[in-house]
Amino acid sequence: MRLRLGIHLDGQRGWQPSDTLGAMVVGPMGLLNVLETQLGLLRARPSQAERIVQYRQCLKRCDTPSRFYHRTFEMDELGTAATLLGWRDLWHLHGWREEMAAAKESRLRDLAAVEKEALQTVGAGIGERLLAVVTAMDRRKLAVDEVELLDPVAAFPKRWRDILARLPLRLRDAREGEAVVESTLWDLQRALIRIRVGEKVGDKLRWKEDGSLTVVRAETRFLAGAWLAERMGSKEGGGLIVATADGAMLDGILAASDVARQGLLEASAFRPALQVLPLALEIIWEPLNFYGLLQFLTHPVCPVSGYARRKLAGKLADKPGIGGESWQRVLDEIDEHYGDRAKDVRKNIQLWVEHPRYAQDSGAPVDKVLARVAYLTDYFRARLVDTDRAARIAFNAGFAQCKACCDALQGLLNQGVETLRPRQLQRLVAQATARGSENPLLEAEVGSLMGITNPAAVVEGFDRVLWWQLGMPALPSNYPWSQGEMNELEAAGVVLPSLSDLLDRTAGDWLKPILAARKELVLVLPPMGEEVHPVWLTIEALFDKVVVSPLEPILTEADAAYPPVLHTPLPARKRWWQLPEDVAIRKNERASFSSLEIQLFNPYQWLLRYPAALRPSRILSVSTDFRLFGNLAHGLVHSFFQTAAPLTVTDKDFRTWFDAAFDQIVDEEGAVLLMPGRRSDLESLRIKLRASMLQLLSQLKGAGIVRVDSEMDLVGSYVGGELVGSADLVLAKASGEQAIVDMKWSGGKKYPEKLKQNRQLQLAIYGELLRQAGGTWPSVAYYLLDGGQLLATDAHFFPSAQTVRRNTDEGTAELWLRFVETWKWRQAQIDAGRFEVVLDGLAEDEDSAAPEAGLPVETLTPEYNDYLALAGCELGA
């Protein structure tokens, strides 16, 4: 076997593919895998999360108040263990071999004491695995004929140098610039080589427009990506693309431009399969994070069955709480849907949603958390045989994450840890997630160039080299140890490269893609204002004049590659929509106030909602405070009037009832108010609603009400067919007089104005339905819950109500007649296929005027219009 080894080649593609047998290009981890396989050392290794838990046990055993890590360990055991394990692994990789118990530096003495425990407890890191390979190489012969070393031996850590000394090495021949002919690129490469060896360049280089060196910049990465996609698609032959940042973005632009993806994968902890575990553990805490629970149930990867989680999510978005009548109704619907499977589905809901929760300050039992993660591990394990490759890879990433978390939790349990607080559990999950997962759908496609994310991974020369987004790279950082500690580490065998050596090697690595270009080098700079790569600053300083081509003019200069794009404005709003003659709208045989209001006052909205049956996005979010408070208030009022003899209770008894009922309804339908940061909102609602309901009760008692029907269903007819509704409160006196009260959360200006202008259409519709059932028109009123205001047009039925004087002699009966005339007018337009768009900014015409006997058209609140964007583009917006 012949190997080519480079220190930065793991996961890269910086060389030309070739048809050879018994030859491999590898990085350090690739070579380690080859060596361990041949030496019989390959075995299952503990995950990094499990190793951190093991090292935490070592730190715990050695912990005393005098240890340097004592205070941080008390605050964050797993975070401290992760940091110090990183130190230990680095030291072993660089040759740690001597005892440091007698070291002068206290931190080294402390870690030397911990090391005695760690040697017996912690799974082997890379350095220890390399030491085992060295020992085995002294006893066994490897089937490796030659290792071509692409980097200097000195660039490798000490443990690797020990291995390289035992391998048949062949050092790579010294390479200079790859440019094949004298050109701007050839001049640049020669100048960079001279700088690299410490020579002075002398005179400035002259820029020649020979096509060998192209530098471009765009105001946005999307434009730069589109230009690069066109360039890549128009030229034949191979090449190399360097993408040290934003590679996934470039791949997306290439795919959209019908150019082969380059496979510039970016590992991410936010892949869908890796999000399930954090969400599942986020919702075990009390108070429940309802935003997290909603995300869990609406996530594309979820252990709860599809229909069940959609129904539960819909309930939680509308009424955020678990338990109560509305929750049970949803569970009953789920049972009916699944039939014989209902028992298993309900068991799953209990496991993932209705489970016990734990106080954050005392923590969750480790065994309970472990059981929960084990269930999720089994969920992913069952999907590892999915026939879809992309899904199978994603499920495997989720399985590996859950398995690592299980192993770490089991380790903690074995160490006697009984509980974990939220921060500790989050840290554990983050460690189990490690680097995240790559997207299996974004692999390199046929026709792609060779691609690297690290400039140091260039192995060979290429005709074309494209460097995407030449932005500021990450630089080596200082070691976290003092000079005294560094000296004692060196005495213990830890040979760490100096920061200056690291910077020097890094600077040399930056030049590799430029020196590898044979015929053409393309540099794509980041947008103006962003920090650029140091290698670009060097290039800029070498030339007397650097030509950076802006890409924006391409948008206005038409040619064969970029045909002109004709401006097509968005459809503008217009007052009327006309349906084709062959499209008929079927009459709605059953109507309610909500459907009739938009039919009368914004017909296009009615058209899209009912005949067209367009539905808003299924993306759910927890109710806004305005809607939530209204729902809770309505529910509490309804609950109170379902009690026995509600009109006879004393204020004291009401307060006793209210306190218990309020807490219950918040738990069942408004538990989002129990989350951190919402205490003031909760208490404000409690105080305001208690006072408001007491005021309502006082008003009803003062008016002599003897019967209250809450949320009363009403059924009747109108000129267009069947009419239904649900009245908030239907009140009756001993005399038989009735009234309807519509409860609103707020609206201190809006609803008095409606009563003043005799425009209380909802009350008029409900009043007509009640009249059809009983023969007489009821009185009507509004009750504003947030202020405890009862609004009526006279004091006949409600002696203590806030009276709003009408500016017309007409009443509710006349309002109903006007409604009928308005409906006939609108229906005639609908029969003709015409629908008016009633929005601010659209001028009315003569057809917009309602009949004199009808209702004037009013502009509805746009916030409740789900189809606002479909009305067209607002001029001037």
Image (cartoon, rainbow, N blue to C red):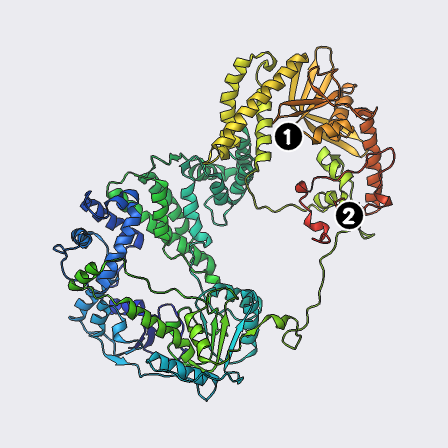
Q: Is residue 39 left or right of residue 224?
A: left
Q: Disc 2 vs disc 1: Cβ atoms closer than 8 Å?
A: no
In the rendered image, the vertical position of residue 753 relative to residue 462, given as above or below: above
Foreground: 173 or 713?
173
- Measured in 3D between alpha carbons, the distance from the residue under mark 2 to the one under mark 1, in whole angstroms, is 29 Å
Mark 1: which amino acid?
Ser
* The N terminus - image quarter: bottom left
Mark 2: which amino acid?
Leu
Measuring 52% from the left and 24% from the top, which residue is drawn there?
662
The residue where tag 1 is placed is 746
Q: Is residue 448 left or right of residue 876?
A: left
**Residue 841: image x %, image y %?**
75, 47
Foreground: 574 or 469?
469
Q: Does residue 323 appear anywhere in the picture?
A: no
Q: Is residue 56 left or right of residue 710?
A: left
In which image quadrant can residue 621 be found? top right
In which image quadrant can residue 591 be found? top right
Measuring 26% from the left and 44% from the top, which residue is drawn there?
71
Secondary structure category for the residue under label 1: loop
The residue where tag 2 is placed is 842
Assess disc 2: are there few (<14), some (14-19) or many (≥20) residues with their C-alpha within 10 Å of its C-alpha.
some
**Residue 27: image x %, image y %?**
32, 70
Secondary structure category for the residue under label 2: loop
**Residue 365: image x %, image y %?**
32, 37
Q: Is residue 415 left or right of residue 606?
A: left
In the rendered image, the vertical position of residue 325 relative to residue 589, given as above or below: above
